[in-house]
Amino acid sequence: DKVSIGSDAVVAAEALIAANGVLTGMTAIETISKVYGVQAVVVSIDPKRIYVSLKEEADEKHVVVELPEHQAGPNGERLCWYQCTVKGGREARDICAVTVAKAVEALGAGEIMLNCIDMDGQCNGFDHALMSAVSNAVTIPIIASSGAGNPTHFSDVFLQTNVQAALAAGMFHRKEVEIDAVKKHMQDKGIPARLAHPDKM
């Protein structure tokens, strides 16, 4: 069994940083992981892109990443930092996704489900810049979320970033792609995947 923590994880990360990294043992992440183990705690991070033209335009506490040309900002910006949100994306906080990821790992999270508000529902693929920045900063598994629209998006995120899992919802709900078709595609690309009905493929 697993427990997913969202907004509270961002607040806990902010508190940890304010306390100079001193653990209190009082956060939900700490208490749950202490009793049930870190594998029981999944933190969901929901950031949005804040585009900048120069790295210096962002506060130095934020991790700025480079974007591929086809994902440049509205004014051609090739850089951004990922601002975390709470309350279902309705409220932005002055903390970046990489910082939150590192903090929740220190608090005892066992996995991170990493979304990208900008990519959600676009069906243009996962945000590789975000996935790479966060997965390279922590040692716990990252689950890629937001943006998948076809089987290639899954193989791409596994082959081009260090995420350990990936998910999609809309493309499956709309019956645009079957789950086993995605798994078969990944197998064809040399990515391990367990087929539910191997005899039908």
Image (cartoon, rainbow, N blue to C red):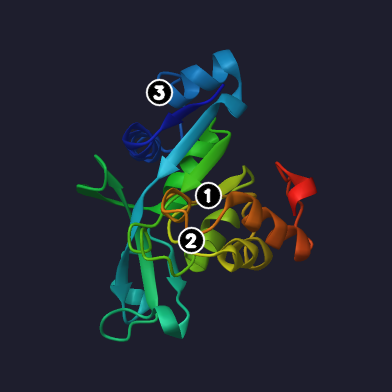
> Mark 1 and mark 2 in contact (Cβ < 8 Å)?
yes
Q: Residues within 10 Å of mark 2 (few under 14, many from 20)?
A: many
Identify which amino acid the numbered label 1 is placed on: Leu
Q: Secondary structure beneath disc 1?
A: loop
> Residue 79: percent from the left, percent from the top?
39, 76
Q: Is 70 placed left or right of 85 in the picture?
A: right
The residue that appears at 53% across and 33% down in the rendered structure is 109
Q: Quadrant of the C terminus?
A: bottom right
The residue that appears at 40% across and 35% down in the rendered structure is 16
Quarter of the figure with residue 118? bottom left
> Residue 116: percent from the left, percent from the top?
39, 57
Mark 3, residue position: 27
Mark 3 and mark 2 lie on one chain; the one further toward the N terminus is 3
Identify which amino acid the numbered label 2 is placed on: Ala
Q: Residue furthest left?
A: 90
Identify which amino acid the numbered label 3 is placed on: Thr
Q: On residue 167, which mark appears?
A: 1
Q: Residues within 10 Å of mark 1 (few under 14, many from 20)?
A: some
> Residue 124: percent from the left, percent from the top?
44, 70
Mark 2 and mark 1 lie on one chain; the one further toward the N terminus is 2
The residue that appears at 76% across and 58% down in the rendered structure is 187
Quarter of the figure with residue 59? bottom left
Q: Is 161 placed left or right of 188 in the picture?
A: left
Residue 95 versus residue 67 in the image, above or below: above
**Spatial CA span between label 2 and label 1:** 8 Å
**Spatial CA span between label 3 and label 2:** 33 Å
**Spatial CA span between label 3 and label 1:** 27 Å
Mark 2, residue position: 148
The residue that appears at 35% across and 54% down in the rendered structure is 47
Mark 3 and mark 1 lie on one chain; the one further toward the N terminus is 3
> Residue 174: percent from the left, percent from the top?
41, 53
